[in-house]
Image: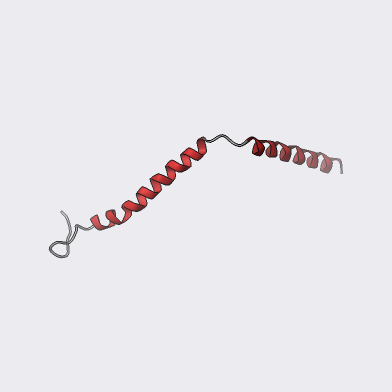
Amino acid sequence: MKKSSKKGDTPAGAARAGATQPHGQIASKLKALYRAVEQEPVPQHFVDLLHRLDEAEGQKTKRQARE
């Protein structure tokens, strides 16, 4: 049974569904964009920086262990 307060009104919930539809479209487009970005390879200079950071942290740990 559909609720309606006046003749010609939309059923309860239909107005909410229409109001959220643009949000749903935006959300699905953002998800698609994020999925595409996730599939991109990591730039080599970021990989190099991460390796340098790992090395620096390893050296710091060794120095602290000696002290």
Furthest residue toward bottom: 6
Q: How many marks?
A: 0
Image coordinates of residue 60 in percent, x first then y, are 79, 42
Q: Residue at x 27, y 54 (%)?
A: 18
Instruction: In the rendered view, tell whether residue 64 sits above or below residue 8.
Output: above
Q: Residue at x 39, y 49 (%)?
A: 26
Q: How is the image coloured?
A: secondary structure
Furthest residue toward right: 67
Q: Quadrant of the C terminus?
A: top right
User: Is 66 situated left or right of 36 in this image?
Assistant: right
Image coordinates of residue 5 in percent, x first then y, are 17, 64
Of 63 and 40, which appears nearest the observer?
40
Image coordinates of residue 20 in percent, x first then y, are 32, 54
Instruction: In the rendered view, tell whether residue 46 sits above or below residue 2.
Output: above
Q: Quadrant of the N terminus?
A: bottom left
Q: Residue at x 51, y 35 (%)?
A: 39
Quadrant of the image occupied by residue 12: bottom left
Quadrant of the image occupied by residue 15: bottom left
Of 32 and 11, which appears nearest the observer?
32
User: Is 33 situated left or right of 52 in this image?
Assistant: left
User: Is 17 situated left or right of 67 in this image?
Assistant: left
Q: Residue at x 82, y 43 (%)?
A: 64
Image coordinates of residue 14 in percent, x first then y, are 23, 55
